[in-house]
Amino acid sequence: MAAITTPILAEPPQLRPLNILRDLPAVADLVEKCFADTIDAEGRRYIQQMRRSGQDSNFLRWATAAVETASMPLSGFVWEEHGEIIGNVSLIPYHHRRSRLYLIANVAVHPDYRRRGIGRALTAAAMQRASQRHAKEIWLHVRDDNPGAIELYASLGFREHARRTMWQAKPERKACTDGLDVTISKRSPHDWARQESWLRHLYPDLLSWYQPMPWQSLRPGVFPVFYRFLMDYDVRHWCANLGREISAVLSWHAMAGGNDRLWAAAPPENSAESSARSLMALLLHARREMSWRQSLTLDFPADQYNAAIEAAGFHRHRTLLWMKLETGNLVNQP
């Protein structure tokens, strides 16, 4: 495979490393402005946390020492002109299977300064820094409705490895499964082997460094029950059955103070038409059973069961392309 070449930046005065002690509030303002049209409740909480952290001296002291160990946006680069931060990129460290990797995130350029190569320069700087720190892989994610950014990252050598859609729905007490001819019951321990097999197919290990599967929250057994009690996790599991055959499984998982998540397990969509009907019935059942919750979220492969999920009342919140660059393909040239 041909090596990928990126320029070595001379780091002009406009481009400098993020200063965690003073830049966080300005970076929060920039990220909010750049993503105002697509930001959700979780994103708003993230921005507010960034602002609070920038004013918390205890956090800043801790963050200065934890830049290379905490999987948080504590390092990166900013682009500054006339004393104003108008560009940002975050570089977040992760460890997976004893290997170091980095996530490039929060690539933002003020609307008045776009199309000047600032985003490219910031991303290239983050790539070089990750390579200097001996990362084996560099990852990023980008919305599928941002073709300009996708083209930019592809030109820097990133290649798509996964495409996932985040679905959301409001619980609904009147959600109805009549007419689907699917029997729904509580999951039994005997159903776990089939559920786990389907989950591993739909939630592959490829992205487990970023979003690990909550296996201890989903498994049956005494120890998982004790674990959930200690962690204050709440879970529920339902099976869809056609005759005597289990056709899909759905788990609801909530953490104290966290978001509600659904984990759907079903065979590949093209393997059985009945599985789509079963998944639709389970999602409708969850909306009815969890009517006291505020919202439900499902992360799922972008090309699987879209029609069934939409028919169950879920709307597509966003689809992300996960792109990766292996640093062995990164060559610096003067």
Image (spheres, rainbow, N blue to C red):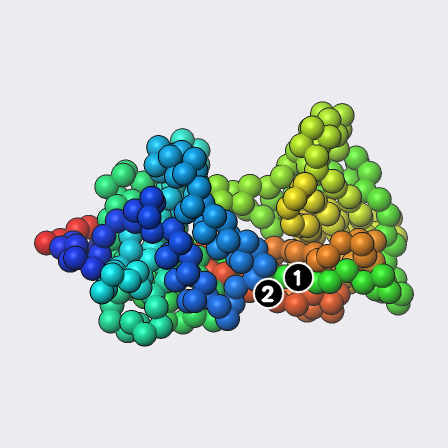
Q: Which residue is mark 1?
A: 168
Residue 231 visible here:
yes
Q: Residue 43, how many percent across, how many down?
A: 53, 57
**Residue at left offset 26%, top offset 65%:** 118
Q: Relative to 181, does residue 100 appear above or below in the rendering?
A: above
Q: Compared to 94, does 161 lie above or below?
A: below
Between 136 and 54, the one lying in front of the other is 54
| 59 relative to 300, above or below | above
Give the number of callouts: 2
Determine whether the residue tagged by mark 2 lies in a helix, strand or loop: strand
Query: For residue 179, which quarter of the picture?
Result: bottom right
290 displayed left or right of 78: right
15 and 131: which one is in front?
15
- The amino acid sitting under disc 2 is His
The residue at which mark 2 appears reads as 317
> Where does the image place residue 222, in percent across and percent down from the top left?
76, 25
- Marks 2 & 1, CB-CB < 8 Å contact: yes
Q: Quadrant of residue 69?
A: top left
